[in-house]
Image (cartoon, rainbow, N blue to C red):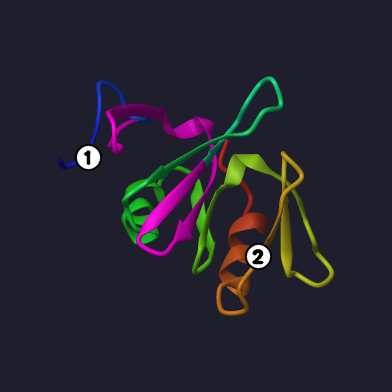
Amino acid sequence: MKPTIYPSPGILFLPTSTDIELIQINNLIRIEAISNYSKLFFNSPGGIAKTLVVAKVLKWFDALVADKSFIRIHRSHLINLSCISRFNNISHTKIILQNQEQINISRRKRIDIIKRLTMPTAA
């Protein structure tokens, strides 16, 4: 089944093992690669982390959400820029998310990430 984003931009229908999940892209905190699968982590109002594992590789998600404020910070992590809480500006090795998770930044991607995070936003 080919993924489609509709009825509006920002909604994704993803096939799982039992059904098709409706995913709101802006509710995603991060996506982590697990071999040939990806684990999606969602914002949760009650503090209970919701996750979903789908049979899609991270590269597939990267191509799909890269223009929607997501950035690849490691070969196994894709994060939502709006969910970043802090950035270790001294060592440039970790990003701390709103849910207090600390994600390592790869050495090869560090310069591009610093540029993107320090880039002024257009009003």
Q: Name which residue lies at 77% across and 44% down.
A: 100
Say which amino acid is labelled 1.
Pro
- Is disc 2 in contact with disc 1, using a CB cutoff of under 8 Å? no
Query: Which residue in the rendered view is the most extreme toward the front?
Result: 18
Q: Is residue 17 left or right of residue 109?
A: left
- Give the percent coordinates (x, y) of residue 91: 81, 72
Q: Name which residue lies at 71% across and 27% down.
A: 47
Q: Residue 49 is drawn in which quadrant?
A: top right
Say which amino acid is labelled 2.
Ile
Residue range in magenta is 12-40
Q: Is residue 23 left or right of residue 88?
A: left
Q: Name which residue lies at 32% across and 50% down.
A: 55
| Relative height, residue 23 to residue 98 (above, below) | above
**How far apart are the two marked residues, 2 and 1, measured between alpha carbons?**
31 Å
Q: Nearer the viewer, residue 64 or 46?
A: 46
| Relative height, residue 21 to residue 116 (above, below) | above
- In primary-sequence order, the first of circles 2 and 1 is 1
Q: Is residue 75 magenta?
A: no
The image's mark for residue 114 is 2
Quadrant occupied by the C terminus: top right
Query: Which residue in the rendered view is the most extreme toward the right?
Result: 90
Query: Which residue in the rendered view is the most extreme toward the bottom?
Result: 108
The image's mark for residue 112 is none
Q: Is residue 76 left or right of residue 12?
A: right
Question: Which residue matches tag 1?
Answer: 3
Nearer to us of marks 2 and 1 is 1
- Give the percent coordinates (x, y) of residue 34: 46, 60
Q: Main secondary structure of the magenta part?
A: strand
Quadrant occupied by the N terminus: top left
Q: Nearer the viewer, residue 82 or 43?
A: 43
